[in-house]
Image: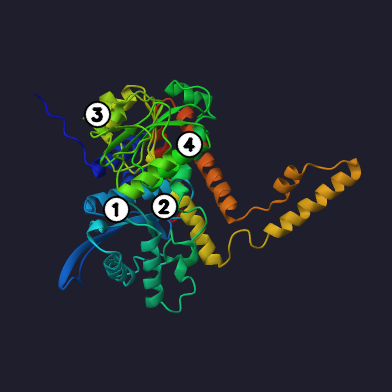
Amino acid sequence: MTVVKEPSFRESTEIMFNRAVRLMDLSPGLVEKIRICNATYRVSFGVRLRGDIHTFTGYRSVHSEHMEPVKGGIRFATSVNQNEVEALAALMTYKCALVEAPFGGSKGGLCINPRDWEPHEMEQITRRFAYELIKRDLIHPAQNVPAPDMGTSEREMAWIADQYQRMNTTDINARACVTGKPLSGGGIAGRVEATGRGVQYALQEFFRHPEDMAMAGLTGTLKGKRVIVQGLGNVGYHAAKFLSEQDGAKIIAVLEFDGAITNPDGINIEALKQHILATGGVKSFDGGTYHADGGPCMELEADILVPAAMEGAINLTNADNIKTPLIIEAANGPVTAGADEILRNKGVVIIPDMYANAGGVTVSYFEWVKNLSHIRFGRMRRRQEENRHRLLMDELERITGKSLSPEFRQDYLHGADELELVRSGLEDTMRGAYQAISAMLHSRDDVTDMRTAAFLVSIARVAKSYQTKGL
């Protein structure tokens, strides 16, 4: 009996990259330059905690500097290793190119379980890790700009930003050294929800393309579509909440680390999230049926599957059993290369991670620009827009002799604030990137899936940047 080996996350990324570049007319040297990771820094440092010195290992990988600064999150997890960080850095390169964010790709990680430490201890550890990176310019507004990832949040980003400011007291752009900060610390409205909101915009755009819907055998709109969500962290929660509350989709299953909840009539996502925050898991939630073994719930009959947790969730062991005709990868690398081939052969349409979860880096870009410009979006124009709109409505009422409804007046007079501008920019970005993928997919007979189309678009943009530099 032949045992098929499951490719690692890094191997999966390279398999998918190689599949795309075989269809491109690039020199072998340029292909290798794009493929390889430029540099990876590994650091082991000690922190005195609980009366003893504890040693931690962290990484910061720079995949491509075709544009600078490089951009990518920092994750805190026990699974962090060099191969994972380098694969994630590569994905960041392609992701930024796809959504036309002017960054190269980077990624970082610290091998730690945050639950093992108290908040004040996590602050000590985070600041020391940041110190090790900052003194080597691996955190810098013009060179390397981290963001939150799995196991980190705006809290850790605030600590890192403050550490940078302490070490660079005269840098006027210090706040731009990291994104995903709290609003009070130079963050931007809409950043916390950004990746989940991007998933929503990606699905909305998919349902505007009849030729793509036909590939998945789907019709109509998102309203009433049955959705399975694997992972109710920041990304999964916001995606599920927006899809159910704003688009009318039914979340029929949610998988978490301690089991799954199913409800064919739709799960109240906000209620489930509050239950998880209160109890630590989905067990005993009364808004659906609890399953201690959540894995099989990913294989239920549904229209859309949203893997929003760890990489490799859909692999050789379960790909054959997946029944949803559409998968949108809200996490990084949730479908292995082996599973990807099985699913494509079954006719499953996969909206790839390098596009689907690019909402985070898109809004991070907006935050970086805000920090460099030192002014909140909308501050200079919001009231001026309102005054111009008021003049127009007053003139319309004078000419017609009729009054506009109070509701219309209120909506039209309202000038866009920062959150509305961020959402508008994110939606425009996600729609534009999707249209580039779809155009590539339908313009070539040798491109049959969205992942390959997305790689072709992004690799071509990276190649163009290197060629412009004279490489």
- Answer above or below: position of 261 versus 187: above
Q: Which residue is mark 2?
A: 466
Q: Marks 1 and 2, how far apart in space? A: 15 Å
- At horizontal 43% and vertical 30% (from top left) the residue drawn is 266
Marks 4 and 3 close (CB-CB < 8 Å): no
- Residue 445 % position (x, y): 43, 25
- Earlier sequence position, callout 1 versus callout 2: 1
* Image quarter hosting the N terminus: top left
Question: Which mark, residue 243?
Answer: 4
Pointer 3 local density, CA inside 10 Å: few below 14, some 14–19, many at least 20: some
Q: Quadrant of residue 113?
A: bottom left
Between 64 and 241, the one nearer to me in the picture: 241
State which mark lies toward you, 1 or 4: 4
Give whichever of discs 3 and 1 has the lower sequence position.
1
Can you tell which mark lies on residue 37?
A: 1
The single residue placed furthest to the bottom in the displayed view is 170
Mark 3–mark 2 distance (CA, rounded to whole Å): 40 Å
The answer for how far apart the CA atoms under marks 3 and 1 are is 31 Å
Q: Report, in whole angstroms, how far the alpha carbon at label 4 lies from the one at label 3.
A: 25 Å
> Counting other residues with Cα less than 10 Å from the Cα at mark 2, is it few (<14), some (14-19), or many (20 or more)?
some
Residue pictured at 43% horizontal, 60% vertical: 68
* Amino acid at dot 3: Asn
Q: Is residue 30 visible?
A: no
Three-letter amino acid code of the residue under disc 1: Cys
Pointer 4: residues within 10 angstroms few (<14), some, or many (20+)? Answer: many
- Circle 2 SS class: helix
Report whether 319 appears left or right of 241. left
Q: Nearer the viewer, mark 4 or mark 3?
A: 4
Mark 3 in CB contact with mark 1 (< 8 angstroms): no
**Sequence order check: which comes first, mark 2 or mark 4?**
4
Describe the element under mark 4 as helix, strand or loop: helix
Asked if the residue at tag 2 contacts the one at tag 1, i.e. Cβ–Cβ closer than 8 Å, the answer is no
